[in-house]
Image: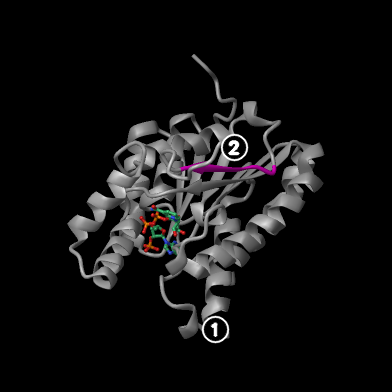
């Protein structure tokens, strides 16, 4: 059996009561990582943490707070103490027409999808360097590689985080601290349901019709499942992935059509 080499380590997994964040938390727990899980809604978070403790027997701390606030991030870092692995995640920005966006709209998107991650990285990276082990994974989006017209806020804010991390990854690699991005295509989560509903409204079709189109367009004939995302995260965070850094890996069932 392959040992991921991270059993007993501690990971903060942001925005992890549901969806892709939960998939990552569950997969890390399956290879023995203790967790600090976060989401805004305490009930759902408690249920998710209970499921993971039950399945894997790891230690899970729950921090119910908004990751986009300074106070929330301070609470998470204080609860975690020593951190070996940081998985950055937050809710995605709303779809819309760029003509309607103001400076405040952009600041909110940057707060959620760039600055929250930046701030947490700043909070954990020096102790990781000292400890000669660190894994930082940003859950971003396929939009980093292939822009999505109605998600301009995602295209912009996530590209900014990706650019910053491209530089950072080279500054810390010498200390066995890696920084990588995981880029989801379309996965079966609440977020995709919201986007499907929005597309259906805009296009005058039913949500079921939009879903079928999305599934048919994908080379796999379906949308992704959170477990398929989570295990890529666990691999990226493993002790064996120490030579993988500054990379952005798209997990989209082959939807983005390119040779490389
Ligand atoms: P999801 O199923 O809607 O789950 C979002 C999770 O994040 C929930 O646990 C939610 O709990 C938590 N959350 C949301 N805002 C938060 C905040 N401000 N502070 C703390 N926790 C927060 O979403 P998902 O599909 O997993 O998406 C995760 C990220 O990947 C998003 O940024 C999304 O845009 C991106 N993405 C998703 C897809 C996809 O196909 N699913 C594709 C590309 C990119 P609470 O509501 O209780 O806080």
Residue 136 appears left or right of 45: right
Q: Nearer the viewer, residue 179 or 25?
A: 179
Vertical order, 77 against 31 (above or below): below
Q: Is there any visible trace of residue 232 in the rendered image?
A: yes
**Residue 221 percent location from the top left of the image:** 29, 39
Spatial separation of the CA atoms under disc 1 and disc 2: 37 Å
Q: Nearer the viewer, residue 9 or 144?
A: 144
Residue drawn at x 55%, y 44% is: 11
Q: Quadrant of residue 51?
A: top left
**Residue 19 percent location from the top left of the image:** 37, 50
Q: Total of numbered circles in the picture? A: 2
Q: Is residue 29 magenta?
A: no
Give the mark nearest the N terminus, 1 or 2: 1
Give the residues in magenta: 246-251
Q: Where's the C terminus, which quadrant? A: top right
Q: What numbered label is drawn on residue 253? A: none
Disc 1 target residue: 104
Q: Is there any visible trace of residue 65 in the rendered image?
A: no
**Residue 120 percent location from the top left of the image:** 63, 58
Quarter of the picture for ligand 1? bottom left
Element on which disc 1 rests: helix
Q: Is mark 1 within 8 Å of ligand 1?
A: no
**Residue 208 percent location from the top left of the image:** 18, 56
Residue 206 appears left or right of 129: left
Element on which disc 2 rests: loop
Q: Quadrant of residue 130?
A: top right
Q: What kind of secondary structure does the magenta stretch mostly adopt?
A: strand
Disc 2 target residue: 260
């Amino acid at each position: 059996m392959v040992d991921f080499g991270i059993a007993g380590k501690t990971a903060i997994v942001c925005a992890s009561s549901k969806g892709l964040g939960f998939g990552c938390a569950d997969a890390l727990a399956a290879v023995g990582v203790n967790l600090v899980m976060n989401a805004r809604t305490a009930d759902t978070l408690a249920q998710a943490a209970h499921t993971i403790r039950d399945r894997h027997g790891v230690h899970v701390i729950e921090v119910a707070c908004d990751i986009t606030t300074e106070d929330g991030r301070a609470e998470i870092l204080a609860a975690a103490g020593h951190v070996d692995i940081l998985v950055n995640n937050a809710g995605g920005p709303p779809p819309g027409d760029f003509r309607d966006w103001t400076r405040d709209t952009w600041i909110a998107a940057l707060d959620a999808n760039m600055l929250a991650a930046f701030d947490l990285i700043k909070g954990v990276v020096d102790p990781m360097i000292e400890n000669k082990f660190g894994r930082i994974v940003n859950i971003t989006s396929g939009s980093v590689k292939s822009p999505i017209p109605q998600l301009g806020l995602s295209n912009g804010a996530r590209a900014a985080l990706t650019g910053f991390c491209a530089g950072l990854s080279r500054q810390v690699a010498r200390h066995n601290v890696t920084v990588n991005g995981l880029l989801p295509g379309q996965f079966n989560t609440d977020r995709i349901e919201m986007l499907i509903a929005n597309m259906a409204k805009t296009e005058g079709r039913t949500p079921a019709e939009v879903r079928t189109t999305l599934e048919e367009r994908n080379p796999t004939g379906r949308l992704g499942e959170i477990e398929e995302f989570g295990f890529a995260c666990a691999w990226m965070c493993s002790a064996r992935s120490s030579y993988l850094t500054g990379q952005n890996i798209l997990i989209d069932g082959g939807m983005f059509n390119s040779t490389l």
